[in-house]
Amino acid sequence: MTCAACVRNVERALKRQPGVQEVSVNLATERASVLPGPQGVEREVLVGAVEKAGYGVLDLQDEAVPEDAEREAREAAIQQQTRLLRVGLVFTVPLAALSMARHLSQAAPDLARLTPWLAWSGWPPLFWLLATVVVVVLGRQYLAGAWRALRNRSANMDTLVTLGSGAAYLYSVAALTGLLPETGEYFETAAVILTLITLGKLLEARARGRSSEAIRRLMQLAPQKATLLRDGEERVVLVSALQPGDRVLVRPGGRIPVDGLVVDGASAVDESLLTGESLPVDKTPGDEVIGATLNHQGRLVIEARRLGADSALAQIIRMVEEAQASRAPIQRVADRVSGVFVPIVLVLATLTFVAWLAIGQVGLAQALTHAVAVLVIACPCALGLATPTAIMVGTGLGAENGILFRNSAALENTRGLQVVALDKTGTLTLGETQLMALQAQPGWSDAELLRLAASAERGSEHPLARSLLLAAKARQLALTDPDSFRAEAGMGVRAGVEGRQVLVGSLSWLEREGVALDAGMAQSAQVLQEQGQTAVAVAVDGEGIGVLGIADALRPESRDAVRALQAAGLKVVMLTGDNRNTARAIAAQLGIEEVRAEVLPQDKAAAIEALQAGGKRVAMVGDGINDAPALAQADVGMAIGGGADIAMEAADLTLPGADPLAVARAVHLGRATMRTIYQNLFWAFIYNIVLIPVAMLGALVPMLAAAAMAFSSVFVVSNSLRLRKLRLGS
């Protein structure tokens, strides 16, 4: 495919097939994604439709290693353009030199007599011979593309190039053979047009290859071999031969070959490849590890769990490829223009030719020259490449920095964000609560208060319950299993312990349940909340027996993350189920001014909707199952950390690391990518808007027009590649 018109032809061919629901074709990646309807559609039908439209197909499903096949196809295309360019240069350079010599000999006849070789410049058949080789060898690919477009009842870049170079060549042949009354040939114009545009295609192909390097680098990090441990022996095998349950040995400095569980050994593992976190993570037996990450100083024995397409690396690559294949909303503007661009250029070229002839001050040759310049200067390629190349580089850079966009629309939406809502637990905090204080009522000991509360929480999976159980274990308290248990979402738990009814939860909930609370408990709870702790009240048989202070330590990066978001002009809001006093104390430590406290899990989506009032664009950052509705409600949902699967499904982008600074980096990347897209589109539109009229006025010769056209798309791709130098977070 050469331009947006080709994309439209392929999409049209695929959409016509029965069973096809949705089609997306990407010019930069040269991939087509098809969503079949309920009745389905055979791949062979789709391949046949594309081939019937005149385009070649590389079906990656048929390849043993799809990525290698795709890379080889790209390299073969680059080699072909290189060979064509060499042929073009070998014949075009002498042709251009002879043309210059002819003009020189006409201007200075005496010099021509002193320089015998200039005599060749006066022999037109030599011009014809050199130009014919270029037109036949280099022009064949453009003629094939133009014919393909004509069969599809459309026009594309190849149409413009073929008409421009073909008109110059055929006019020159007609003038040479005396079929036209005017003399003078433009063989060098046809040859230079084709050679310069082929040079542009080569540079563009190389640049487009570099734009997909991020995925290639990720693939290359995956080890091909592993040391299998079986029956006490070590054996080197291909990773593809491993099965779930196999145990592999990873020595210091080696890359972990599979996703799995550490069963022996201890080490620190560099997971920056996938999470973006620079500090190594300690791994001991029972910890999960990710394939392709780097083992540092220790020896690890790992039991394989997820292999091949199920591995974390494969899922990341698949997610990046899907994002790159998707079409950003802003692309619709370029698509609408591209749909009518080439026909408009053909009309303008015809009008140019007719107008110059009508003026009467120029001949047929000069009018044709101006029309050819209009055909050649127009560049639909730049319009087609402006958005997808930037998306490719942006999503690839994101993957290398632990930022995974679900689609290009998510990347585009980050640019317009005004508010970022951060869920407190697990996002701003470590998500590992600790018991900080015990304040029992008179007649009750701290130990008994903790024992009853921990026994009641034995059936709970809430992080607060875990902190109570760990504290009871550390104090060696004897716990009992509850006779009955019921969790009240966002409130607390109700359990039967040793024949007594125990309530553990917020003070307000206990009050609503009719528990007798004295002023001392309320005062103790307020003091704990002002210290940034969550106050958990405990009641037995309707009587309050004490208050527990539980705190979740802030992540060390949270303050910097909030400052970075605020420096980017974003309003930061904290969402939490904590009471207002505790929430305000934590927010004050982070520099967050607005807090939505006492938000129940089921009310988070409503809180996001309230923030969106007045048309504000809001991002939601969370990591839990109860965050999924809010993530879906937000304009941009970000699932951070390990996260729950349902949260990641609802999110627009995933941040595998637990670092909240990744939120600021994602916004930075989204804005930089969109800025690049706007620059590309501005260039593509302004280039055509300015230079087409210049060519129509006769101020551009076709050779200069060809050079400008060749390098316009190269400029767009090169500008997109500048994103690779972006320092995220700077």
Image (tube, rainbow, N blue to C red):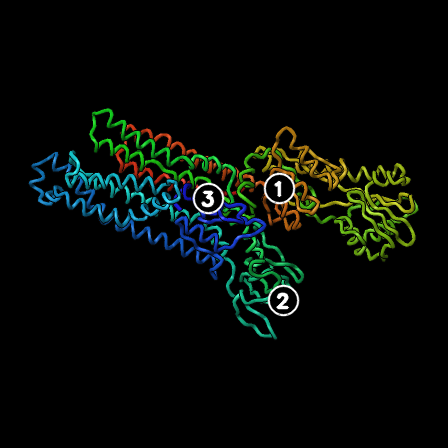
Q: Residue at x 75, y 38 (%)?
A: 598
Residue type for callout 3: Arg
Seen as rendered, the residue at the extreme front is: 18
Q: Is there a contact, CB below 8 Å, between mark 3 and mark 1?
A: no
Q: Position of residue 82 (x, y in %)?
A: 31, 51
Residue 724 in view here: no
Residue type for callout 1: Gly
* Circle 1 residue: 637
Q: Position of residue 625 (x, y in %)?
A: 69, 47
Quick one: 568 or 450, which is closer to the camera?
568
Tag 3, which secondary structure? helix
Q: Is residue 145 above or below residue 591?
A: below
Q: Residue at x 26, y 51 (%)?
A: 87
Quick one: 636 or 136, which is closer to the camera?
136
Tag 1, which secondary structure? strand
Q: Earlier in the sequence, mark 2 or mark 1?
A: 2
Residue 43 in view here: yes
* Circle 3 residue: 12
Label 3, label 2: how many angstroms apart (C-alpha)? 47 Å
